[in-house]
Amino acid sequence: MSGKLEVLTPQNSQLIFIDQQPQMAFGVQSIDRQVLKNNVVGLAKAAKVFDIPTTITTVETGSFSGHTYPELLAVFPENDILERTSMNSWDDQNVRDALAKNAANGRKKIVVSGLWTEVCNTTFALSAMHDTDYEIYMVADASGGTSLDAHNYAMDRMVQAGVVPVTWQQVLLEWQRDWARKETYDAVTAIVKEHSGAYGMGIDYAVTMVHKGEERVHHGKRIGPNPAK
């Protein structure tokens, strides 16, 4: 039975962020860049909630790409950042060692978020699958390419090779799986409220208007209406 029939769990997964750096983001045209960063940070917070081992790798930070998004680093202030020269993260031994350490503990499902889809993500995914028994789960909406075609065709190529396409919210909810898991319930819904757009707005609405709960922020008095004469 294929391991890909097994859903993602907090026990079988690890996560790698590849080159989530400003100069790489400047070239992204396949997704709105603010949406991209929102999704990346939402995915990072999800990994933090579920204690998913997370690798952060960068390329040519000082000479070209710039520093990893501070919002992402703020989620993992204790993490080392693995610097490379190669466009393919698999060519760096530090990256291989970090992934292998986690895989040795049963975490062979590698969730990937990176820039650019058609270069760094594709070469990493194909190389890792060629050389190991890892499964690659490519987070399509927390990755970006230099054009929509570049992103889509790269995703197609990877899927043809056996990569599993996912979205960041799908990964979050797959890790949660059951709303009866109260130990992560509040943290997951907090991520949704902040990063999941209409879904998060819906939760706020349901809590306050349907269940008559408290608003999640304090604010000034509501004054009016006072129709002008």
Image: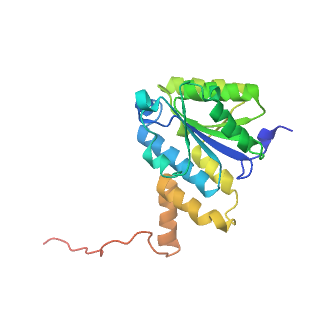
Question: Is residue 144 positioned above or below 200 on the image?
Answer: above
Total label count?
A: 0
Q: Residue at x 55, y 49 (%)?
A: 44
Position of residue 96 measured from the top left corner of the image (x, y, whole percent)? 68, 33
Question: Is residue 96 positioned above or below 53 on the image?
Answer: above
Front residue of this view, candidates 58 and 161: 58
Q: Residue at x 69, y 25 (%)?
A: 127
> Left or right of 27: which side holds 51?
right
Question: Is residue 156 positioned above or below 56 on the image?
Answer: above
Position of residue 155 measured from the top left corner of the image (x, y, whole percent)? 61, 28
Position of residue 67 measured from the top left corner of the image (x, y, whole percent)? 43, 38
Observer able to see residue 198: yes
Q: Residue at x 47, y 51 (%)?
A: 74
Position of residue 55 measured from the top left corner of the image (x, y, whole percent)? 60, 42
Where residue 166 sits, quadrant-wise, is top right
Q: Quadrant of the C terminus?
A: bottom left
Q: Residue at x 70, y 46 (%)?
A: 13
> Left or right of 214: which side holds 96?
right
Q: Quadrant of the N terminus?
A: top right
Observer able to see residue 28: no
